[in-house]
Amino acid sequence: MKIKTLLLLAAGALAIAGCSTPTQVDTGRVQARTFSFITRKPQASPINGDSYAPIHALIQEAIVRDLAQKGLSQVPAGGDVTVAYLIITGNNASTASINDYFGSREDASALHNKAQNAYAGSKNPNYFEAGTLVIDLIDSKTSALLWRRHVSRPMLRNPTADARAALIQGVVDEILSDVRIVP
């Protein structure tokens, strides 16, 4: 079985696994003019630094670019919608989630478990590494989840900065391709 097919199966398993935490949410059109990112949780240890800072910057730049094309303006805080995202990385045996910009919602653990089951549940004995990006749009006033999508892709080994940026932009483009924004 090719890695691409395996990843499609993993993505499909994420989409249909369990009902308690939906992987896809769409309550219709998202009414908004502005957005802000979720307030980041404080780092546990400032000494270690943030090794994911470059990845967060690329993801946020890609999201800002896509949402600006849909007519939304970024504000530092208090936007009409709040953008949250969760990064899940894994292989045949284990997964890890980076939820710095996802918040402390109970969904993070459930989504991580779904990814673990999808990644490790394959009968394919070949080693693979993959990543999943989940993006949520949340009503800033009510905290209601308005829209959620995810995409899984193979992880690149030692990519150039341009290759990494292009992959992340492509993933964000695919995730946000069908969000319907109305002012």
Image (tube, rainbow, N blue to C red):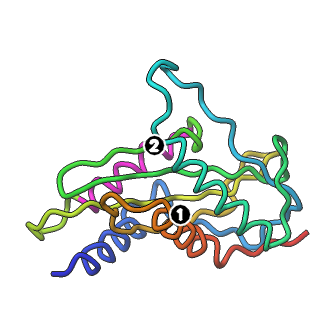
Residue 124 as seen in the image, left or right of residue 77: left
* Local SS, label 2: strand
Q: What stretch is highlighted in magenta?
A: 105-119
| Residue 151 in the image: above or below residue 78 | below
Q: Which of marks 2 and 1 is nearer the N terminus?
A: 2
Badge 2 is on which residue?
Answer: 98
Q: In which quarter of the image is the N terminus?
A: bottom left
In magenta segment, residue 116: yes
For the point 47% across and 18% down, which residue is it?
47
| Residue 5 in the image: above or below residue 128 | below
Badge 1 is on which residue?
Answer: 165
Q: What residue type is labelled 1?
A: Ala
State the residue in front, 64 or 165.
Answer: 165
Give the CA distance from mark 2 to mark 1. 18 Å
State the residue in front, 18 or 89.
Answer: 89
* Local SS, label 1: helix
Quadrant assignment, res 63: bottom right
State the residue in front, 130 or 22.
Answer: 130
In magenta segment, residue 118: yes
Front: mark 2 or 1 = 1
> In the image, residue 51 lies at what x, y percent?
45, 37
Quadrant assignment, res 6: bottom left
Q: Is the magenta stretch mostly helix, strand or loop?
A: helix
> In the image, residue 41 lies at what x, y percent?
60, 30
Residue 148 as seen in the image, left or right of residue 121: right
> In the image, residue 103 lies at what x, y percent?
59, 38
Q: What residue type is labelled 2?
A: Ile
Q: Residue furthest left?
A: 125
State the residue in front, 50 or 40.
Answer: 50
Residue 117 as seen in the image, left or right of residue 84: left
